[in-house]
Amino acid sequence: MDTITQIALGTTIAEAFFRQKLGKRALLFGAFCGWFPDIDVFFHPTGSWEGLAAHRGITHSLLCLPLFAPMLGEIGFRYGKKGNRSTWIHLAFWSLITHPLLDVCTSYGTQLFAPLSNHRYSTDAIAIIDLFYSIPLLYACYLSISRASNRSRARTIAQLALGISSLYLGLCHVISSICLSKAESLFTKQGFSVQSIRVNPPMFLPLLRRAVARNSQGDLITAPFSVISSEIPELYLQRRVSDPLITTVLNSNEGKIFQWFADDFIVVQNDGTSITLLDARYGLYQNPWWSPFSATATITEGEVSSLRRVGRPQNTDYKKELQLGWQVMWGK
């Protein structure tokens, strides 16, 4: 999830279970450990293929993070000057390990078992930014750093915030499961043979999911589904196009990285002058095949250039998108 939420989670864990033994410096240490797995963004240039492949990789691995806990715990022990070494290591461990466990609940994908496996795990339960999840944690952090707040009350609120956010996260998994079942049933009834299916939670609309499915030919179908509406949504179908130039692009090293990153949910476009790949796991109600992740290769005299990443589309009307999503969520 977003960096602020991960920092808030680490801080809340520190307040809820460790501050009484380790003192107020545990808050800053918990915040740092909550952020630490995202340190991988500093190792590769923004927008690079290396960054796309490495982010949420080894620094998010459940196999590697426990190895960082003793080292960071030792730093906390020397920095904190209170409590014992073992308690600082425990704080480091829980602040570190909850980071990828929360990230895996989004649609982006997290390599939980790197370097043994580069499989990207995701449960499609929650958006990258979800205020309903984050606000209890942020409130607990506010009480933790407020000089006017009672320490016992701040600790209790932090424990309640972790419980409320965890219950909400569980509810989001239930909502995703219901929408996924509805989507798979509808797509099958429409004659689409589902080989793989995903549901993407949009921001600020927790009762809504955008489902996208792929068949064995690489064709895609998508539609929005609301857990509180029985209305049949509008379906959008995208056929996988293929030609020798597209095959060349997909078989390139960059093309393979993009397919792996998008879990093979790819829209391929060829307008004669360029070939564009879109990550189809995302989308808008105004444009079902919009994507924040895309790449393009230029066609020149029957040859294609190297695939290069493209930035997030500009001039998107997010206000209208939220309005449309709200209407869809209520079945309008």
Image (cartoon, grey):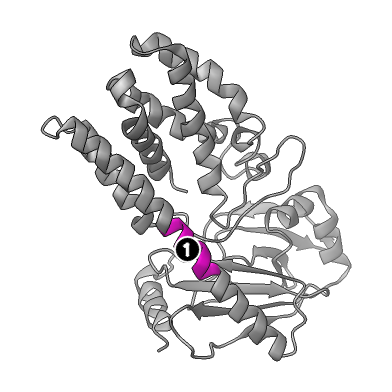
Horizontal and vertical percent position of residue 49: 67, 44
Residue 247: x and y in percent read 86, 63
Amino acid found under the numbered disc labelled 1? Cys
Q: Which residues are magenta?
A: 168-176
Q: Residue at x 36, y 26 (%)?
A: 18
Q: Is residue 172 magenta?
A: yes
User: Residue at the location (85% across, 56% down)?
Assistant: 251
6 part of magenta stretch: no
At a point 46% along the width and 33% down the height, the residue shown is 95
Q: Nearer the viewer, residue 201 or 274?
A: 201
Residue pointed to by mark 1: 172
Which residue is at the front of the view, 168 or 212?
A: 168
Image quadrant where residue 179 sits: bottom right
Q: Secondary structure at mark 1?
A: helix
Q: Is residue 2 above or below residue 198?
A: above
Q: What percent of the width, then of the height, locates residue 27?
A: 32, 27
Residue 222 in view: no
Residue 138 as seen in the image, left or right of residue 114: left
Q: Measured along the vertical axis of the image, is residue 210 above or below residue 159?
A: below
Q: Crowding at label 1, few (<14), some or many (≥20) Cα neighbours within 10 Å?
A: many
Left or right of residue 146: residue 246: right
Name the side, left or right, on which 210 lies relative to 213.
left
From this viewpoint, which residue is outermost toward the left?
148
Give the quadrant of residue 29.
top left
Dominant SS in magenta: helix
Up-down relation of residue 239 to residue 2 (above or below): below
Quadrant where the C terminus sits is bottom left
Can residue 45 be seen from the camera position used here? yes
Residue 260: x %, y % from top left: 74, 53
Task: Give the camera-side residue of 201 and 166.
Answer: 166
Observer-nearest of 297 and 288: 288
